[in-house]
Structure formats: C-alpha cells, structure tokens
Amino acid sequence: MRLPILQWGRGYDRKTLAQDGAAALIVTLMLIPQSLAYAMLAGLPPQAGLYASILPLVIYGLFGSSRTLSVGPVAVLSLMTAATLGQLSLKGIAYADGALALALLSGGWLLLFGLLRLGFVAHFISHSVMSGFISASAVLITLSQLRHLLGVPLEGALWQWPGVLLAQLDAMAPATLAVSVISLGLLLWARHGLGHLLQGRLSAGRALALVRLMPALVVVLAIVLSGLLELENAGVAVVQAVPAGLPALSWPDWARLPWRELLMPSLLLALVGFVESVSIGQTLAARRRQRISPNQELIGLGLANLSAGLSSGMPVTGGFARSVVNFDAGARTPAAGMYAAIGITLAGLWFAPWLSGLPQAVLAATIVVSVLGLFDWRRFGHAWRYSRADFTALCATFVVTLLAGVEAGLVSGILVSLLLHLYHSHRPHWAEVGRIDGTEHFRNRLRHRVELRPSLLCLRVDESLYFANAGQLEDIIATLVSLRPGLRHLVLQCSAVNRIDASALDSLLMINERLGLAGIEFHLAEVKGPVMDRLERSELLSRLTGRVYLSLFQAWNELGEANAGPVAGGVN
Amino acid sequence: MRLPILQWGRGYDRKTLAQDGAAALIVTLMLIPQSLAYAMLAGLPPQAGLYASILPLVIYGLFGSSRTLSVGPVAVLSLMTAATLGQLSLKGIAYADGALALALLSGGWLLLFGLLRLGFVAHFISHSVMSGFISASAVLITLSQLRHLLGVPLEGALWQWPGVLLAQLDAMAPATLAVSVISLGLLLWARHGLGHLLQGRLSAGRALALVRLMPALVVVLAIVLSGLLELENAGVAVVQAVPAGLPALSWPDWARLPWRELLMPSLLLALVGFVESVSIGQTLAARRRQRISPNQELIGLGLANLSAGLSSGMPVTGGFARSVVNFDAGARTPAAGMYAAIGITLAGLWFAPWLSGLPQAVLAATIVVSVLGLFDWRRFGHAWRYSRADFTALCATFVVTLLAGVEAGLVSGILVSLLLHLYHSHRPHWAEVGRIDGTEHFRNRLRHRVELRPSLLCLRVDESLYFANAGQLEDIIATLVSLRPGLRHLVLQCSAVNRIDASALDSLLMINERLGLAGIEFHLAEVKGPVMDRLERSELLSRLTGRVYLSLFQAWNELGEANAGPVAGGVN
C-alpha cells in the first residue's frame, strides 16, 4: 500500500494552497445540497449525506491516486442503496443497520480487490452495459423523486401511479407543487440559460462554477422563504431536524448486521462505484498528463467507504460533476478534497439546525436536474449503427434495470455481454487468402484482387482456436478440401490465432491426420511466439505432415514453385 | 427435418443387407449384457435397459445422420441418471416416474436444440472438461459397483466405507465374492489376454468381435452355473424376474412427473450424451470419408430419447465400444441398428425369464471392466505440459465431480473453462514488431532480429479488442509512448484483431486523441475486412490523426522515409 500524499505533499507551497482552497470552497458549496439530496434519495436521514462527505474525503485524499477526484455521495450509488435497503426492510432489517453494513462491505470489497490487484474485474462491465445502467438509473431516480415533487405518496407498480395520483388529487398541497415548479425552473434555467448569459462576461471556468453553485443558492433561498412563508403549515413536506455536530465514530455491532444478504448487492455497488470513479479519474488525469493507478484507486475508495461506514455515512465514490468543477476551479492536489471536508464539517457544526425547514421538493428538484444529463440517449443510436451486440447489451441492461431493478439489470447486462462475446468467438470468421500482386502481403480473395494457386490453399482463421470453435475449424477445412480436388498443400495462416488450447490442439491433430490420409500436406505459417512455445511442448509439430513457415510468403514461394508441375496433371 | 433413410435406403441391396445383418448380430449380443448392466447402474429394473435398446434404435435409424453409431444405454448417462434419481427419491418422487421424465426431457432438449440449430451449445464443453468428467465418472461408477461385487450394502460417505465393510464382514457371502472374482478375471483376461491369443489366428476385426462378445458369454455361463449351483440359496444376489414381452407404449401422466426438478439435470444429460455421441460419430464417419450433421444428430438422438421415455426405457445415446464394433463388423447403414433392435426384441420375448437367475455381481463386473478404459490418465499429463488453463479445467471438473457429484462437476468445469478463457483474453499479449531484414514481414523485436526506427513504433496486439481488454490497450500504449520521446508515428498492426466492440472503439478514440495531443500520429495497418466494415460506420476513421494502411510494410515505407529527416532533430 502506498501513500500518494508523500509524493504531492513534498512540493506543497502557498500557490498550490490557494488553488486548492479556492476549488475546495466551490466544491463544498456544491456538496452540501448534493449530500442532503442523495441521502434523501437513498432513504437515509440528511446527516448521513453530510457525514459521508467528511471522513471519506480525508481518507481518500491520503490513499487515492487521483489528484482531482471529488469523493462523496453520488446519485447512482444512492439509488442502488435505496433499492438494496428497500429489499432488506421487507425482511425486517433496520435501514440504518443496512446502510452501515453496505458501506462497510462495499469498502471491504474494494480494499480486497485493491490488495489482491484484482482491479481487472471492473473491466467486465462493458461501456455499453454501464451506459445502459446509468441511463436506466437516471429514469428510476427521476421517477423516485416524483412523490416529493408532487407531495403525494406514489406506491405500487408504475402503471398504477396515474390511478393513485387521481385518487389523491385532493390531498395534494398546491404549495408543494409551486415549490417544485419554481425550483425546477430556476435550476433548469441555471443549467441552460445562465451559461449563455454569462458567456463573454466571465471566464468559462468561473461561469461553470457559478452555474454549479446555483443548487446551493436555491437551497439557501428555499430555507429562507420556507421560514418566512411558513411553508410547513401549508402542507409542504420539509427536512426534519438535523443534529448539529460531528458524526460519532461508531464501532458497529458486527453480529447484528445483515452481512449475508448484502454480499452480492455490496459487490455490485462497489463495482459500479469503481468503474464510474476510475473513468472520471482517468479522463481528468489525462488532461494534465498524469496517470492514476486502478489498484491504488481501489484501496483509496475502499478505505473511504470503510470510513463512511464507521462514521454513520453512506456509500461514496468519485462524482462526475463535482470532480469536473474541482478540476476546472484549479484544484492541484487531493488536499482540495480535505479542505472541502473541513468546509462540510463547519457547515455541519453551524448550519445544520437551519436545514430543518428546507422543503423536500427542493432537494428532489436538484436531484432530477442533476441526473437529467446522465441519460445518454445518443449512445443507443451509436451502438445500433456500430455493433448489434453492443446495442443488445445496452438495451438488455436498460430494460432489465428499469423493469426488474438495479441489481438484476447490472447482472443481466454483464451476462449478456459475456455471452455475446463468446457467441461471436465460437463462430470464427475465416478467409481464403491470396497474394496481392507485387507484394508479400496476403488478403481475402473475396475482397481483394489476389493471385491464387490450384495446388495450394492458404486459409486465414480470424480467431484464437479454443474449445468453443475448434470443431468449426474441422468443418471449414473439410468443406474447403472437398471442393478442391487438385489440392496438395493447405497452409493455415495463424497471424490472428492468439491462443490454441488443448481442445483445439486435438482438432489440429485430427485435421493433420485427415488431410494426410487424403494426400494433402498441412502447414502452419506466421505462428506467434507464445503459441509456438506451447506447440513445441505438444506432439503436433512432430506429427505435422508439412512444415511451420515464418511467413505465408515463404510458404507460398517454397510450396508453390516446387510443386507447380505435378499439380497441373492432378494428383488425387 | 430430413429423413436420412431416403438417401441410404435407395441403394440398399443384398450385399449391404448381409453386412448390416452380421454387424447387428454381434451388436445384439453385446447390447444384452450392457442393457441389463447399465439399467442396474442407473438403479432401474433390468427390462428398462432392454426396452431402451428397441424403439430408440429404430427411431435413431430413421432420423440420425451417422451410419454406424450404435445407440442405447451407456455407462456415463446411467451414472447421471442414478445420481439424479437418487436426489429425486430423497424428495419422495418415484424412481420410475423420474426415469421416464428424464428420458422425455432430455429428448425434448435435444430435439429443441436440433430444430433451432443450436448444436453449438455443446461446443462449450471443452475436451478437457469432458475428459475430466468422464474419468471421474469411471471412478464413481466403479465405486458404485463395489456393493454388488462385495455383496454388502455400502452406505454413507466414501471415508465411512471401510468401517461399514468391517462391521458387515460376517454378513458377506463367500459365494458372491467368488462370482465377482471369477467374472472379473474372465472379463479382464478377455480384454487383455484373449486378443494376444487370437492374434495371427483370426483377422483383427473378428478377434475384436470375439473379445467384445465375452461379456455375453460370461452372462450365459453365469446363468447356467447359477441355476446348477443354486447360487441364490448361497446368498448371492440375483436379478429379479424380468417380464417377457414387448414394452407397452405408455402415455405418461404429465401432471405427476417431476418436470421442474429435472429441467437442469436433463439438460446436462442431453449435452453430455450429445457430445459423446457426436465425437464418436464424427470419428467413424471420417474413416469412410462420410460426414455427419450435428443438427440432424440432435434430432435423431432427441427422438430416440423421447421414444425411450414412451416405452418404459431409460436415457440413451451413441456408445463408444458398441459403435466401434458395429463399424468394424462391417455395418454400412443405420439398418444395422434396426436389425439389432429386432434381435433385442426376440431376446426379450424368449430369454427374459431366463435372466432372473443371473448374479448381480456378474453385471457389476461387466460394468467395472467396461469403464476401466474410460479413465484417461494420460490426458492429465498432456494437459499439464501443454496448457495450465486446460489442466486447471480438467482437474476442477475431475475433483468436483468426484466430491460433489456429476451435475456440480460438469457445471463447474464449464464455468471454470469459460472464466479462464475470458481471463486470458482480458490480458492481451502484445509485441513491438520490427521488419525482418530483406522481407516485408514484421515480427516481435524480442524474439527475432529485426530492424526498428526511432520515430516509428509498430505495435501488434494479439487479441480481439473488446470491453474486457480495451482499458489495457490504453495502458500499454501510454507506457510505451512515455518511454519513447522521439516518437512521431504509432502504427497498430491489427492482423490479430478479429473484432472491435463499442468499448474498444471508445478506447481507440481516446488513444487517438491523447496521441494527437502529444504530437504523435496514430495509424492502423492490416485491418481485416469485417473489422474495417464496422469501423467505416464509426467516427474513428474521420477523427484518426493518421491513416489506415493495407499492410504494415506500406506504412513502414511511407512513414519511415518521408519523416526520417525531421525526427532526427526531435519534435517533442
């Protein structure tokens, strides 16, 4: 385990301090409304969000490898937390216990993967699956906030909602609707109109910072107006009392926590958090020619989540919008995150009691506006045009997540993409290749004008040979050979064969034997080093009726000319 | 659905009839003891084996595509049947109902796969997994027969057996032991000594046939001696009364059968039966330059199993030893199998009552001797030397099958081999390639003496690019570029890239952008046709800072010479 702080801490000077401090101020002001809103989204008390934005930021700052990632509660993880805790509460397990165990367990997974250097597991969530999952999450999050925006408890399945809504039309408070409409309007205008307005008057970075601070401004405005207009008496649901002060570090009652039920959900939560965080971290690092280490990220995020679990917080990871603001505001080192933690602590100490009048509808509006950008509808069109397999994985993830929930959606997306990958590799593309005139290069006879020879068949198979496709190669060769009576030599061009497993070795031996019986020599060409190393430990090379050539061109020269004569007359 | 009989039936003449008839006689004499023994192994009454060797043979003869496959009960399927039915009986489901449903369901699966042309699913059982499974099955089958050979009920876990044995030493009948030893001795001698004895005196085919008939001879001998010596009174367990006559076609009581419990076991049974049968069928067909159609095989075997289920039989598939005998004895068409069915019918009509005195120990001895050859210990050594991944899959299947049963063993073997395949492809092998002097061929600089250029980096990645390894390529290139300050061009040789999915496309775009920022042009070479088709539908080609070259040699010529001058001075 490394301590990245030892690297960046050494050269820390006043200028860096000023840059980090300025970024921290803006991030703090962004984090306060986000913390409250994502805690509400997760179904937790508002202080859980604040607490998750203190200790985890400090811990990540010490152990994480990204210099500008802003760690804290994020929308998608909050949705996953809500889904998981909702399931648990059906089994009679307390929400608080569940949230605690979820943060600890997902932290444990991340730390474990980091220490075992197993960061690669995250690669098995393809971009298409992740995109489908996030888009579906955006829809689910928006739907989940409708009850707060309308001020009506929406229960049951989606298609029952219109009925529920109609039945409760009388109970709806006009004040809640007004609050929702005004805050949604303000936030949407800030996002789409304010930027235009500021263009030319402020630098792009400052304009973005101002846009990003609007949610904080709206929250402050809402608290003030809520107090003045006594909105709670007008039927508007408000945030309940938030205790002032620091979170108490609590040693959990290990035996009581629902470890077993959370093993799988926490794994998925950890993976999603890691994938999101790493992709943001890599993008930002690349902009400044820095690098992040995925395994160090796992350790940093793992410890951050463990500390969230021990300080009454909720699961955390790097947030996209916050990190971009942090970067643009000039943060140079992870110290910026630590300063933001101080900011949140002060806010918690001084402003927490003030929060209790805040209408829930305002928080819901900030959530809805911030997740609107997560729905990546362009990706559907791109995937459709580029690759049907990716489109299928994307749609499967999206639809299953919407209909059956986040866990089922993610798992089925991963499975679908893996199965499609296997399905493709089990049906290898192959081509009979010929020589492109005047070169030593060989290409598909169906796509290029190439030279061919009657006694020589050059076959390129475009896949590693392994158990799932070994039988196909036998079939392909049997078919080709049956169509070519004058054939004397078959050369398998292995430039695209990256691996030959034991099943495929059996098939090659079988092909060699069958071709031998038919009087055809079997040759290999362009066998890669690692593949050749392995073949040398097998009996294939000693049994081969032909030879192994370094290049297909060599085989072409030797086999074509020496045997050109007899072939014309026909051998078989 | 085709009827292969229409092909071979047309030219059917007297000579073929004589050849098929002779083969059928030998196969019938082999099938009788095998049917009885495998029914006992499956825990079913002896007639189930006989019945499974009548109608299924006729049906397979009509619909199957192999000309010499001998269908009927086989050892491994009988073991799987016993394991499945044992599980069911714990849940209080009758053995007979279970066997019926198992044959019907596995027939249904096979037929379904055949009609949907899904024969490829069988490819996902690798040779290593199948070999480990069959070797473990041979051990399990041998162990399961110990109770019959010793005449003592062996219950509980394997490590308890010595204790159980000692406790029941008194109850052991010496006569049973004598029968076991004598029949084992005779059968082993027939297998290993008789062949030598006959060498030179008979043709190889006739000698093999005689060896294969020894079990039938031993059974007849045992029946005669058992009657004369009144072995049953000496404490030897004998086969109970076998009803004479044909099986009644029975329409099952669909509602009562345990469909749900058998869905998974019947699928595995169908797959194993299919894989075994197809590999035998292909080997025999290749010897006479014939071909079999996997999908037609699925239909043939599926209908055969359905008919077994409807005629009080048990699951069937092509048997290895029997099929080889059938082939060697000169069978030319599937009619040989139909004649064998007639032979079994006559045997059932006339000899069934005689079977009732046959000692079970004799059947156990025929089972043990016939499965001895299934244990493929050589494969372990080969796999170890050739590929650790294959060795792992082989051992995992073997060990889990032995310890946790056939179903768990097969499933975990398939999963392990798939995971290992994915694990390998997620860490692509790559090489910096250079030109082999005087050729247009490029190879790994670490393995061959090649020419390199300071401003040009030629990189070959030996794997299709997809979600699981896309991130790795970014890492590899970032590392290589950071070590080469004078670099101006990077060419990715795509000869081994058989597919680029949407995640990898994202990575290529990212690499292109990052290289562009560093002043390095990004080129592709030797992109395969299908990959290129797809790239043309993406934005990569329009954004590419470099070009796409037909061959790496072209790129080498154009990029090397034109830019050789400025590079010497250094650009970045």
Image: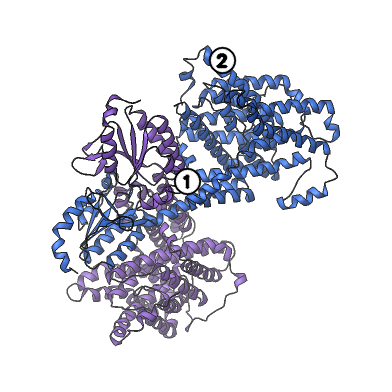
Chain colours: A blue, B purple
Residue at left offset 70%, top offset 28%: A47
Q: Residues within 10 Å of mark 2 (few under 14, many from 20)?
A: some
Mark 1 crowd level (few <14, some 14–19, many ≥20, 10 Å Cα) = many
Quick one: B25 or B277, which is closer to the camera? B277
Q: Position of residue A216 (x, y in %)?
A: 69, 26
Give me the disc on residue B178.
none
Tell me the residue that label 1 is attached to. B502
Q: Give how far across and how far down residue B305 sits, in percent.
A: 47, 72
Q: Residue at x 28, y 61 (%)?
A: A510
Residue B211 versus residue A390 in the image, above or below: below
Residue A68 spot, x, y in % from top left: 53, 25
Q: Chain of mark 2?
A: A
Whether residue B432 sits left or right of residue B398 in the image: it is left
Question: Which disc number belongs to residue A18?
Answer: 2
Residue placed furthest toward the top: A14
Depth check, front residue: B158 or A404: A404
Query: Taking B497 as reference, is A143 left or right?
Result: right
Residues A352 and A539: in front is A352
Inspect the image, locate mark 2, and give the three-letter code of the amino acid beneath it: Ala
The answer to whether residue B460 shows anywhere in this view is: yes
